[in-house]
Image: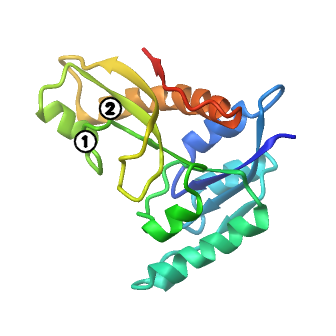
Amino acid sequence: MSARVAILISGSGSNMVALADSMTGDHPARPCLVLSNVPGAAGLARAAERGIPTATVDHRPFRGDRAAFEDALQAELDRATPDIVCLAGFMRVLTPAFVARWQGRMLNIHPSLLPLYPGLDTHARALAAGDAEHGCTVHEVTAVLDHGPILGQARLRVLPQDTAQSLATRVLAQEHRLYPAVLRRFAMGERGRIDIA
């Protein structure tokens, strides 16, 4: 029996596509839902093209009531009955109460070599620090933002001509390699860390 995977997005869904397209053949998981907090997010159409059920919970009507927003998210997840939830460019911070429901079953990808640069503007921060290396991290989601157990990292060398935008582009290509590799292992019950150069 394949593990069922729900993927949460806010935008174009490029990591969602990488994950969904990897879940074929002998892969131990299959996508069961793509859920967005942004109506009309481009990733929803990309999911529908792949025959993946989609849903939207617009966060804006819930302004000031995160619990109600997360209850609506949870209702969509309950309908889809996923075993694993993958955050893939989902640009909302989730409360500890919501995360606790999925403890040990929720993954996120972050565009830095955690524990360096949790939060936003990771590429500019790496350049400002003069880092020789940069990359991305897949980790389990915990109540502390960008702080859960690391399941995998992909690294690249920072080039003298790099800008925040060029780094973002290069790191995104690494994300598309790393996240599917970690998900495959995670769906098989493997929690050991992998590193990709």
Circle 2 packing at 10 Å, graded few (<14), some (14-19), many (20+), is many
Give the residue at the far right of this rendering: 1
Residue 116, percent from left and from top: 25, 37
Residue 91, percent from left and from top: 44, 59
Residue 127, percent from left and from top: 17, 31
Residue at left offset 32%, top offset 36%:
114
In the image, is 26 to the left or to the right of 119?
A: right
Pointer 2: what residue?
A: 113
Secondary structure state at the residue bearing disc 1: loop
Of residues 153 and 102, which is closer to you in this image? 102
The answer to whether the residue labelled 1 contacts the one labelled 2, judged by CB atoms less than 8 Å apart, is: yes
In the image, is 152 to the left or to the right of 45?
A: left
Where, by quadrant of the figure, is residue 35 drawn? bottom right
Which image quarter is the C terminus in?
Answer: top left
Q: Mark 1: which amino acid?
A: Tyr
Residue at left offset 53%, top offset 27%:
192
Residue at left offset 54%, top offset 49%:
12
Secondary structure state at the residue bearing disc 2: loop
Above or below residue 13? Residue 111 is: above
Give the residue at the far left of this rendering: 129
Residue at left offset 60%, top offset 65%:
40
Above or below residue 153? Residue 62 is: below
Where, by quadrant of the figure, is residue 65 drawn? bottom left
Distance between mark 1 and mark 2 Cα atoms = 7 Å
Above or below residue 77? Residue 139 is: above
Residue 147, percent from left and from top: 36, 47
Pointer 1: what residue?
A: 117
Of residues 15 and 197, which is closer to you in this image? 197
Q: Mark 2: which amino acid?
A: Leu
Colour logic:
rainbow
